[in-house]
C-alpha cells in the first residue's frame, strides 16, 4: 500500500512540476523575469466572452508544445477582462489590468499576446492565429529576435 501511495505522490509531483505558472500580477512577473533572465509573454484575454481568446487558450496556451517551451524560456502573465459578474476580478486586479491595457493594448485587441523583455521593452505582439501550436511557439520565438 505504501508503494502505491508513494508512486501516486511521485506522479502527482511530476505533473505539478511540469505545469507552467501563469502570473496575474505584473510586478511578480517582472521580478521573476529579472531573476530568471527571461522574457515575458503577456496575454490580454476576455476569458468569458471572446471566442478567439478561448481558442488561443485551448489550442495554443494549453498545448504541450507551448507548455514545454514556455517553462524553460518565458515568464507567463495573463491579464483577463471578463464581462460576466460571476467572473468579476478584484478592484485591485481590475485596476492593474486596465493600466497595463492603457500602456500595452491601446487599441483594445483581444486576444493580444505581447512579448516583453525583462526591462518591459516591447519586443513584438501577435493575436490568435489558426496555426499549429508549434507554429505559434515559433512565431513567439521570432518576436524575441
Image: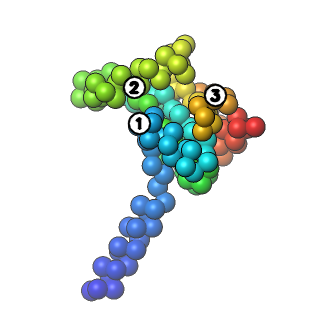
Tag 1 or tag 2, which sits nearer the N-term? Answer: 1
The residue at 39%/26% (across/down) is 96
Kindly tell me whether residue 49 is visible in this rendering: no
The residue at 41%/25% (across/down) is 97
What is the C-alpha distance between the residues marked 3 and 2?
A: 18 Å
Q: Are marks 2 and 1 in contact (CB under 8 Å)?
A: yes
What is the C-alpha distance between the residues marked 3 and 1?
A: 18 Å
Secondary element at image label 3:
strand
The residue at 34%/29% (across/down) is 93
The residue at 48%/51% (across/down) is 20
Q: How many discs mark residues in the rendered view?
A: 3
Q: Which mark is residue 96?
A: 2
Secondary element at image label 2:
helix
> Along the line of sight, which residue is nearer the eye, 72 or 63?
72
Q: Which mark is residue 25?
A: 1
Tag 1 or tag 3, which sits nearer the N-term? Answer: 1
* Quarter of the picture holding the N terminus: bottom left
Q: Which mark is residue 64?
A: none
Quick check: 140 left or right of 9?
Answer: right
Most extreme residue toward the top is 107
- In the image, residue 48 sits, relative to residue 15, either above or below, namely above
What is the C-alpha distance between the residues marked 2 and 1?
A: 8 Å
Which quarter of the figure has residue 112? Answer: top right
* Quarter of the picture holding the C terminus: top right
Residue 101 at what x, y percent from top left? 48, 20
Quick check: 88 left or right of 27?
Answer: left
Amino acid at each position: 500500500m505504501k508503494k502505491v501511495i508513494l508512486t501516486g505522490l511521485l506522479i502527482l509531483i511530476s505533473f505539478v512540476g511540469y505545469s507552467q505558472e501563469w502570473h496575474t500580477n505584473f510586478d511578480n512577473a517582472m521580478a521573476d523575469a529579472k531573476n530568471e533572465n527571461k522574457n515575458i509573454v503577456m496575454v490580454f484575454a476576455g476569458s468569458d466572452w471572446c471566442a478567439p481568446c478561448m481558442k488561443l487558450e485551448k489550442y495554443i496556451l494549453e498545448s504541450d508544445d507551448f507548455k514545454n517551451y514556455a517553462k524553460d524560456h518565458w515568464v507567463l502573465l495573463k491579464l483577463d477582462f471578463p464581462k460576466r459578474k460571476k467572473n468579476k476580478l478584484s478592484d485591485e486586479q481590475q485596476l492593474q489590468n486596465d493600466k497595463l491595457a492603457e500602456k500595452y493594448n491601446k487599441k483594445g485587441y483581444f486576444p493580444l499576446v505581447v512579448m516583453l523583455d525583462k526591462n518591459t521593452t516591447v519586443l513584438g505582439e501577435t493575436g490568435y492565429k489558426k496555426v499549429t501550436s508549434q507554429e505559434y511557439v515559433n512565431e513567439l520565438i521570432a518576436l524575441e529576435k
